[in-house]
Image (cartoon, rainbow, N blue to C red):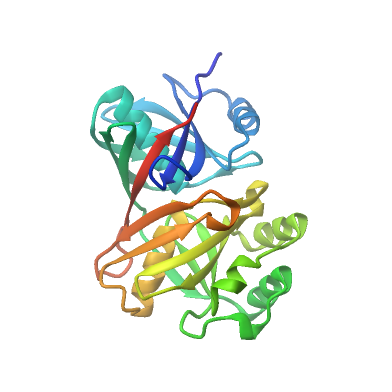
Amino acid sequence: MIMNVLKIAAFSDGEAGGNPAGVVIADAFPENARMQAIAAEVDFSETAFAIPAGTSWRVRYFSPESEVPFCGHATIALGAALALSQGDGVFPLILNQAEITVEGRREGALVAAALQSPPTRSAPASPQLVSSALELFGYTADTLDPRLPPAMVHGGSNHLLLGLKTREALAAMHYDLDGGRALMNDAGLVTIILAYAETAQRFHTRNPFASGGVYEDPATGAAAAAMAGYLRDLAWPHGGSIEIVQGEDIGMRSRLRAEFSSIAGSSVRVSGTARFMV
C-alpha cells in the first residue's frame, strides 16, 4: 500500500518555524508495523494517521519509536490537511483514549488551526522523579522557580513540568538522550516541559522528547494543554489564556496559544498556524 504523507509544520511563526509533522489520510489503517515504519521514515517527532469513521475521523499517532496516545502539533497539522481536502470546518476526532475536535481554516498560504484537548489534570511530582530530572539536565533545586512547583501534568498524555527561574537556564538545557529515554519511559512521560515565565501570560518552553527518540520538540500542543490545565489548578494569574514561545533555541521558533475556562479539568483550546512544507 502506497501512502501519501503530507508534511506540515504546526504552530508556525508565520511562514517560518513550527514543528514538522507527517499526516496520512487514508481509507483504512495500514498494519501497525507499517505505520511505525512510515513514522520512522518520515523521521518527524510524530506522524498522524486518520481514516473516516462516520461523521468523525479515527486518528492514531506514531513517533519514530512508538505509538503515542495524543499529539497536539500533529493534530494541528491534521486540521490543516483536512481543511485542504475537505474544506474549512470543525472535525470530530476519535483518539485511542479520548474524543476531541480540530478546526482548520485556510488563510492564504497558511491554515489557522485549533484543537480542543482531552480533559486536563495535574498533581505534585514525586521528589525522587524531580531529583532524577534535575540530575539529567544538570540543574539544581535553586534553578527552579518556586512559583511553579514541579508537577505531573496531563492534557491527553503525561508530562513532567519543571518551572525555571531564568531564561538563561532554559537556553542552557542539555541532556543525554539515552538517559532521558530511560527516565521518561520509566516514569510514563511523553515529554518533560521546561518552562520560564516571562510574564504571567507569556511563557518560553522547551520539551525534551527522548521517549519518542527525539532530542527536543519545537512545538508541543499536548504539553501546552497540560500546562494550561496546571496553571488553572495552581490559580496562576493567567487571565484565561497564555502564549507559549517554543523552539527558539533550536532555530524553529513556534507560537502556541492556549485558552481555557476556570472549570477544573475542562478541555483547553490550543491554537496556532500551520504551513505546508515542500
Q: Nearer the viewer, residue 114 or 265?
A: 114
Residue 73 pos. (x, y %): 45, 45
Rendered view: 48 above or below 239: above
Residue 45 as seen in the image, left or right of residue 24:
right
Residue 150 pos. (x, y %): 54, 77
Instruction: Give the quarter of the figure containing the N terminus.
Output: top right
Residue at the top extreme, as displayed: 1
Q: Nearer the viewer, residue 264 or 243?
A: 243
Q: Residue at x 58, y 43 (%)?
A: 45
Residue 69 as seen in the image, left or right of residue 170:
left
Residue 275 as seen in the image, left or right of residue 134:
left
Residue 86 pos. (x, y %): 28, 24
Q: Residue at x 38, y 79 (%)?
A: 234
Q: Nearer the viewer, residue 175 or 56?
A: 175
Q: Nearer the viewer, residue 146 or 94?
A: 146
Q: Is residue 95 visible?
A: no
Residue 76 pos. (x, y %): 39, 42
Residue 161 as seen in the image, left or right of residue 95:
right
Rendered view: 162 above or below 43: below
